[in-house]
Image: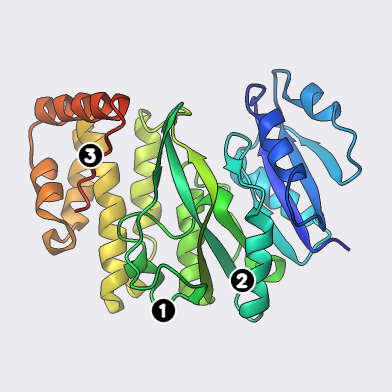
Amino acid sequence: MPFFSVVIPLYNKETHIKNTLQDVLDQNFKDFEVIIVNDGSTDKSVSIVEKFTDTRIKLFHQDNQGAAAARNYGIEQASAKHIALLDADDMWKNNHLEEFYKSLQKFPDAGVYCNAYQLKLRSNFTHNASYNLENLKEIQLVKDYFKASCIHPLIMTSGVAFKKQKFFDVGGFDPKIISGQDIDLWIRFALYTEIVFNPKITACYDKTVANSLSKKHLRKIKYEFLNNYKEQENKNPSFKNYLDLNRYAVAIQCKYYNDKEVFQLLKKEINAASLTKKQLFLLNSPTFLVKNLKKLHSYLIEKNIYLTAFK
């Protein structure tokens, strides 16, 4: 039995999957298997995977059902007690699994382990994620995941490992949530199990890969699942703040795409005290200004300058 099962959902990533898979094979910690779930790819992704001869790689196939269903299926097939997730367009440093192992040795009874990560904003520009933690030097049990994640979330899909049984205990990924199923799972992990954070930066989230928040129904889905935790939200101020920050992020997308219906639904839920002055300004700004500021933000990234409304 391997120590880690690395689960990778694969859908039309022919330009990324070779490098991503090589990142796994180059890990310092060698005791792992790789579970790749081809989610109905129509490009050359599968043929690229099939060229690898490492016997630790196991390739499964299913009709296209989305990343949540692919991850769930991959975790079901996994042999190891510990699961590490990796998206087919993200990157790992060669100490990624090694740092998870260190966290597991220090806190063996926790359920979820996350490493620090970078954001790839363009081809040659990365930015380290920021966390609301006092101690950024030691592996630690997280006292309040929601408070710690008010700038960037501690857990990023390609930067998390967890015990397989804990994953099933909290219900796994919800396939009905087409966009945001990862945030939904992190919420359930944070509510029901202990989380360990390792400040070593070992993964990179590629934000240059296009997302699909331009589609109205996906924004509506996010609004709905963010409202699924009303009871816990009303009892936990930091959780309320965390949910409001996620609502704010979707609301700004709504404003950008002139989606007035979902914007108004989201705005009604947001407590102004949850937001910074910058965020409140953007939330109440006219659409044309939000679009122009987005252009300025993109221009600054081209100049290797990253500004955020979270400070």
Tag nearer the camera, 2 or 1: 2
Residue drawn where x is 27% and y is 34% of the image: 305
Q: Which residue is mark 1?
A: 143
Identify the mark nearer the N-term, 3 or 1: 1
Q: Which residue is mark 3?
A: 252
- Give the camera-side residue of 41 and 48: 48
Q: Amino acid at mark 1?
A: Lys
Question: What is the distance, in whole Å, between disc 3 and disc 1 at their CAs?
Answer: 30 Å
Q: Residues within 10 Å of mark 1 (few under 14, many from 20)?
A: few
Measured from the top left, where is residue 60 in percent x and y?
A: 81, 39
Question: What is the distance, in whole Å, between disc 3 and disc 2 at their CAs?
Answer: 36 Å
Viewer can see residue 174: no
Q: Secondary structure at mark 1?
A: loop
Q: Amino acid at mark 2?
A: Ser
Residue drawn where x is 80% and y is 64% of the image: 3
Q: For the N terminus, which image quadrant? A: bottom right
Identify the mark nearer the N-term, 3 or 2: 2
Q: Which residue is mark 2?
A: 103
Residue drawn where x is 45% and y is 54% of the image: 183
Q: Secondary structure at mark 2?
A: helix
Identify the mark nearer the N-term, 2 or 1: 2
Residue drawn where x is 38% and y is 35% of the image: 217
